[in-house]
Image: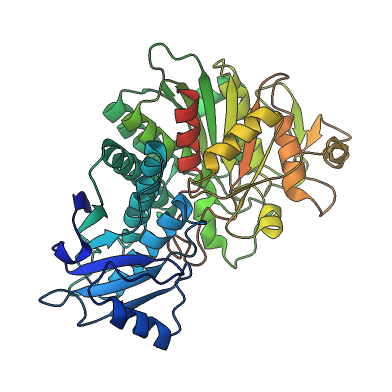
Amino acid sequence: MRWQIVTGSPESVKAEAIVFGVFEDLDFTPLSAGNQLTETARQIRFKGKAGEAFFAFDLFGAPAKHLLVVGLGTRAALGPDGLRAASALAVRKLHERFLKEAALALPLDADSPQARSESICALTEGLLLANERFGRYKTGEETPYDGLHACRILVSKRKPEYEEGARRGEVLAQATLFARTLVSEPSNVLTPARMAEEAKKLAKEYGFSLKVYDEEACEKMGMGAYLAVAQGSKNPPRFIHLSYRPKGARFRLGLVGKGLTFDSGGLSLKPADNMGAMKSDMAGSAAVLGAMKAIGELKPAVAVEAVMAMAENMPGGSAYRPGDILKSMSGKTIEVLNTDAEGRLTLADALAYVQRQKVDAIVDLATLTGACVVALGPDYAGAMGNDQAFLDEVLAAAKGSGDLLWPLPLPEAYGKYIKSAVADVANISRIRWGGALTAGLFLKHFIDEGTPWVHLDIAGPALREDDGIDAHKAEGSGAGVRTLVRLALSKGA
């Protein structure tokens, strides 16, 4: 979609449709048809609350334009998240009319340049994210509708922060859409080797350094946990390391993404119901690649080491077994109690590897536990870590990004549930409860003392079961991309 920032009144803008945002005070006075709209709103019991919208016809423009009224809630409560949601809702409604061109008149006149930049950034994200659908495998439609082609964003006065904010919003949206596409791809297409190819394309486009390790190289480095998970599949694993190292960077951030391109559960086979959703078990690595795409565009003054241990967990004849004892890259041994607790095994070696890159702090993202979805539902990711100050930075980066994070504890007392009688640690808890926390505690075993680390369990939001605010049902959401990019920007400021 092409976007353009324009000035003028809503009625003067050339477009098929106009989107007009209204607060709960229902102030339609900027429009010539204000009185009629007030009466229409009364008749249909439209209150101007966030999430409400209605079309009005034959009231606007000559020839008449589609007028879409979108509720914004209260003036005091409106912020970037509200603007993102309003613009995304508008796009969904415009799609219902198969429209190609629209203009948005939503309130962007915040008090400070930074606030105005954040507002139009969020609005642009909502426009672009809601406009794209994953439909590349659909056939047979005579004239498929491909969404809005152009959108004009109305402002009262042109200011540099509007252009800067909208450009940043476009970069963040495109990076998120890139991650969404990777998650949405089926596992017969998106293999570990294909992820390595995607990383190679990014490296070439943005000048990142790239290392891709095969099984032999990983074995030499002692990655016994990661390789055990991969050994049951005919699709070979690929361990990916992208580096962004700008001159003068004073901070080195490590990003680690879980990369199971398909997870059958291995010999501890998952139930058949919904197993197809396990194509999304690489959403953590997709988020890391998406973040690197945006970092390549925005070029923050922070070094980034991005690591993804890509593999399939399959029940082939060479698959690893419950009862196996694995030696990880860190030297610690792991007793396998359940082969469906595989992501934490791959992350154990990925975390050990990234720490050898002398990073100052680490964020890992993983579709790690169903327990986190039980605790927080489908929209929130769980956030836990070993350093409160760094955890607060990650939570601050998520605020206003469109990613929903909720802090969870890592109680040391729960460590007893992953103790092993025959190895240093067991790969799953011996009780049902607190599974997200014991998984986090398992990962903490592989973090060196003094290294700030945050773990994001994105199992809930990674693949949408229904429409989200700016994401679509049955597609990847790109969870985590914008948080990682905002964190990198803050560290490079």
Q: Is residue 440 left or right of residue 10?
A: right
Number of numbered discs present? 0
Q: Nearer the viewer, residue 472 or 155?
A: 155
Q: Considering only vertical position in the picture, is 451 above or below 195?
A: above
Residue extending furthest toward the left = 63
Residue 226 spot, x, y in % from top left: 60, 34
Quadrant of the rendered image containing residue 184: bottom left
Q: Quadrant of the N terminus?
A: bottom left
Residue 278 spot, x, y in % from top left: 54, 55
Q: Nearer the viewer, residue 391 or 273?
A: 391
Quadrant of the rendered image containing residue 275: bottom right
Residue 389 spot, x, y in % from top left: 67, 28
Q: Residue at x 44, y 70 (%)?
A: 25
Q: Residue at x 74, y 25 (%)?
A: 332
Q: Residue at x 21, y 80 (%)?
A: 59
Q: Nearer the viewer, residue 253 or 59?
A: 59
Q: Considering only vertical position in the picture, is 18 above or below 199?
A: below
Can residue 229 be seen here? The reply is yes
Q: Is residue 450 left or right of residue 216?
A: right
Q: Nearer the viewer, residue 315 or 179?
A: 179
Residue 161 spot, x, y in % from top left: 31, 38
Q: Residue at x 70, y 59 (%)?
A: 374
Residue extending furthest toward the top = 248
Can residue 260 be seen here? The reply is no
Q: Quadrant of the C terminus?
A: top left
Quadrant of the rendered image containing residue 129: bottom left
How did the renderer colour the structure? rainbow
